[in-house]
Amino acid sequence: MKMIWGFIALDMIAFTAYVFFNQGSITGLVDYLGGMGLWSMQVFIDLILALVIASVFIVRDAKVKGVNPWPYVVGCLFTGSISLLIYMVLHGFHGAADRQYASE
């Protein structure tokens, strides 16, 4: 499973680098946010909520594993899902469903 997360993380890093170098850094983001319609704003807010929820799961999972979660949570502010994907590659994520299947 870590290989799949690693592949997704590398793809996301490559795409983010492409966007950064072709659309500009913060100025491109500010221009985009300034021209957003209602649907774009809804998707953006939904993404922020999903990242917050994922960060909560990462914090809980990291505490169980004895890993410091804060570099990944803070990284989420700057890289979006990339830091969460890196956490998945390095530490995996074993939620309740994984524990259920492991016990069968």
Image (spheres, helix red, strand yellow):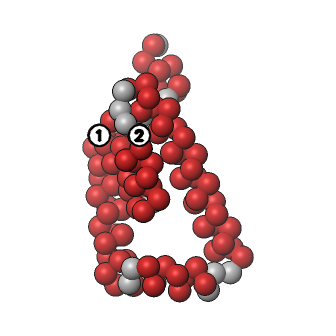
Relative to 60, say whether 12 is above or below.
Answer: below
Q: Is residue 20 left or right of residue 53?
A: left
Residue that lies at the very extreme toward the right in this rendered image:
38
- The amino acid at mark 1 is Leu
Q: Quadrant of residue 14?
A: bottom left
What SS does tag 1 mark? helix
Spot occupied by residue 64 in the image (x, y as percentages of width and height): 43, 25
* Residue 85 appears in the picture as rendered: no
Q: Which residue is located at x 38 percent, y 84 percent? A: 24
Mark 1, residues whose alpha carbon is within 10 Å: few (<14), some, or many (≥20)? few
Whole-angstrom CA distance, mark 1 to mark 2, is: 12 Å
- State which tag comes first along the sequence, 1 or 2: 2
Q: Which mark is residue 71?
A: none
Q: Residues within 10 Å of mark 2 (few under 14, many from 20)?
A: many
Q: Amino acid at mark 2?
A: Pro
Residue 88 image offset from top left, x and y in percent: 37, 42
Residue under numbered circle 1: 90
Residue 69 - label = 2
Position of 63 compared to 12: left or right? right
Residue occupying the point 33% across, 35% down: 91
Nearest to the eye among marks 1 and 2: give it.
2
Residue displayed at 34% across by 84% down: 22
Of residues 17 and 76, the one nearer the viewer is 76
In which quadrant of the rendered view does residue 75 lie? bottom left
- Is residue 12 something that shows in the picture? yes
Q: Position of residue 98 (x, y in %)?
A: 46, 26
